[in-house]
Amino acid sequence: MKNVKVAYSVCNVSNSTGGGMRRSGCWLDVSRQVVPVNKTSATGRKTVWNDRSESGGRFVEILQGLFRRIGYTCSSFQPRMLLRNFLNFYDLLLYVMVGMVAMLCYLNSLNGDLIHDDIVAITTNPDVLGHTSLRELFLNDFWGKPMADPLSHKSYRPLTVLTFRWNMMLGGQAVEGFHLVNVVLHGLVVCLLTFMCRTVLQWNTENSAITGLLFAAHPVHTEAVSSIVGRAELLSALFFFVSFLCFHKYSKETKSFVKTWFGTHTLSLLPGFLVLLGFRIWMLHGSLPKFSVQDNPAAFAPSVITRFLTKTYLVTFNAYLMLCPTNLSYDWQMGSIPLVETVLDMRNFGSMFLFGGVLTIFIYYRRIVKIREITVLSVALAILIFPFLPASNLFITVGFVVAERILYIPSAGLYILVTHGLQRLKDWSPRATWLLRISTFFLLTVFMWCTLRRNAVWQSRETLFRSGLESVPQNAKVHYNYANLEKDLGNIELSKRHYRTALSLWPSHASAHNNLGTLLTDPIEAEYHFKAAISINPFHARAYFNLANLHSKQDKKEEAEAYLKQAIDIDPGFAEAYSALASLYADLGHMIDAEKLHLVALSISPHNVDALNNYGVFIQSLGREDEAVEFYQRAVQINPNHTVALLNAARTLRSLKYIDEAKQLYKRALEIDEDPQVMDNLGTLYLKSGRFREAHKLYGQLINKHESYLEGKVHYAQLLMQERSFYQAEELLLSVLNNNATYREAFHQLAVLFIHTNKTSEGLENILQALRLCHVTDKSCAQLYVSHGDLMKDMGDLETAAQSYSLAIQLDPEICHAHLNLGVTYHLQGWYLEALKHYQTAQTLDPQNPVVLENLEKLKKKMWKKSALECNEESKFCRTW
């Protein structure tokens, strides 16, 4: 170890207040410990304890040092001081105080919903849901897609995803647990920052508290704390400050933190940094994330001057958000900050002022001689600048214009500078101390109030997207997001208006074109928007998918098949496209290929509820109803709010005669959403199972809440007819026809009502009116032909009745009533063989039907009687019988 010479001044301390220090002597402050140093002896010889040249040998030197340390420790042992240093009560109180304030600022965020990026990062992320192994988790990006996938976002945050997974394991999708972890992490970061001010900067309690409290309450942090995906920034800050403190502890023995920073210790960390950087580059798997002009317009500006001026202004804009967070937004893309295209733009003065101010600080920094002030400025500028640079757009293109969450760490450096400036003002004018304290307290109060208000914005999807319209109304993306919200809420017209606004602000917004197309009733206009989305982005798989669905509805099967295959080529993991192609093949009768595609969709995404539901519908159409119910149940287990799967399962269970189970599923669906169709389905279940009182109550609620739902009124009229309230039923059906003069089922039920009340001519007129509204191949009209046949049979026109029953059977061969009554007409006309065939078909469809069994028995007796009179071996009748 090299000899180190320490210069100090000799002084006499003869009036010390301590009893053990009353003798004259000299003291030297080294490493915050008071060490006695002997004065020069009378002979002129200096007694220097660390002079190795006078040592008799290495062993003697070690023993001397050991005994010297033991002796000094024993002589200076003070139990009270030791206990105080150990407990650090005042510092502990400081850390508890700033941590509690940090968490109190975000208490009203604990019950916030999963919104915006939270939905994709948590509710649909297989890594978070536990559908992948830990090894796969560390190989996937933040959204659950493999890093090797060319479509991956390339954002690699496995530790954050792992904490999400732990949250999911412990508390499921309860949002309180996710938010609580974020709030606690914020409190820990604030405590670490305060601890750093006390130890690294060696600040007093007041200055450390000011820095910690201003950082804790800053409104710009709401995105990082209130948004669950902001946990990535919180964990990054936590590890940043822990690493910083470890580095400081490692460098304490050099006695100069700044020299260590720019010395050999920093260079020794370079290999580790290069290894981590190499690993991160390797995880990109040879491809960078793909960004578009709507993500970052400045990066795609054609002019070099425009790119330079805009990017420098964006740095100024971020600094403004930290200094004056009056207008915050969850998104700053698509026109929120117009490009700076000329040097005459007034915003350039802000950039010049900022960079000039930073340059001034650096010039001042070079003239400072106080080592403590150099340390403060070095730490503050390092925390302010270095963490911000990778996301600043200056050197690396990122997928956003401005993101408030990336200011989480840099704002700590800013408030170290602010606190240092306040202290310099206090030193310059001690009289202003209390004024500055009051101003700081006022600023802290304003910050806390703004943060609590900003937390309310992140409570739900609706509050967040509405706030975007208020903050940056010129941003096309906030209009697009708000349109998505209104579409999900069922406000179609409002949704279409905001999609059109987004397109007026940003005409090349492909997803806005695509989503608008899904809402349009005009197929020509919808096709225009789908094709516009494809022309803007030829790799927009969703646009191909929606265009295929449009052509499928128009019975253009070949075009639909081609577009679905194109969507699959673009995105081989597009499970919904496989499922839709399977449904298309099923409509074409290619059942084997259809089932294969359904299974491919499920192999790609085993937990895709839409794929599970669609496969259930497919196998139900094949008659495998028990299997279908299992797939519906799997879909509901994954997403308990998937109403389509719930309704399909309920309908299937109803067809299987599991009435109570079907009723429970309908009620679950109503708890999620009081949809009129669900209420109507439950009402018909009550009606067919004979629970008229429950059905009456439910239909009363349905008509009161959804007066425009005509199908429910028609079914309610059926219930009233069952209760023989024919007058009320007639009024209800006539009101339906007043609203919609072409409502076929209303004419049908009105005809049934008139037949029941012996108004045969009115019944015939209404049934014929309903049949005029039928298409020749419309399967739903089969029941109308059955009713017309019943009416003709009652009127004695057996030939016309037989024609109506035959038409019904052509449209739907599964109607037992049509086969039965057609058999009756043939029976009455003496066409026994035809009657026998239809009786037997009816018996196959409904083996326990007593009327079918009775008529068969009568027909058998008549045929045996006839055979006894007319039968011989050559008779065709006998051979058939």
Image (tube, rainbow, N blue to C red):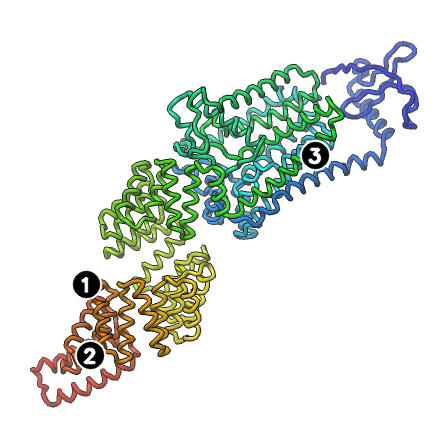
Describe the element under mark 1 as helix, strand or loop.
loop
Is residue 745 found left or right of 122 in the rendered image? left
Q: Earlier in the sequence, mark 3 or mark 1?
A: 3
- Distance of mark 3 from mark 1, alpha carbons? 82 Å
Task: Relative to 168, say whether 878 is above or below.
Answer: below
Disc nearer the start of the sequence (1/2): 1
Q: Amino acid at mark 1?
A: Val
The picture quadrant where one finds residue 618 is: bottom left
Mark 3, Cα crowd under 10 Å, few <14 / some 14-19 / many 20+, is many
| Residue 290 in view of the camera | no
Q: Secondary structure at mark 2?
A: helix
Say which amino acid is labelled 2.
Lys
Residues 133 and 866: in front is 866
Q: Which mark is residue 776?
A: 1
Towards the viewer: 260 or 197: 197
Q: Secondary structure at mark 3?
A: helix
Q: Please state the horizontal and vertical placement of residue 624, each as a whole percent of the image.
A: 33, 64
Which residue is located at x 39 percent, y 43 percent? Answer: 498
Quadrant (top left/top right/bottom left/bottom right) for the C terminus: bottom left
In the rendering, which numbered label is found on residue 793? 2
* Left or right of 663, for residue 195: right
Q: What residue occupies the far top of the structure in this picture?
A: 44
**Which residue is disc 3 drawn over?**
209
Give the mark nearer the N terminus: 2 vs 3.
3
* Image position of 767 (left or right of 286): left
Badge 1: how crowded within 10 Å, few (<14), some, or many (20+)?
few
- The answer to which image quadrant residue 218 occupies is top right
Q: CA distance from mark 1 to mark 2?
A: 22 Å
Q: Quadrant of residue 502?
A: top left
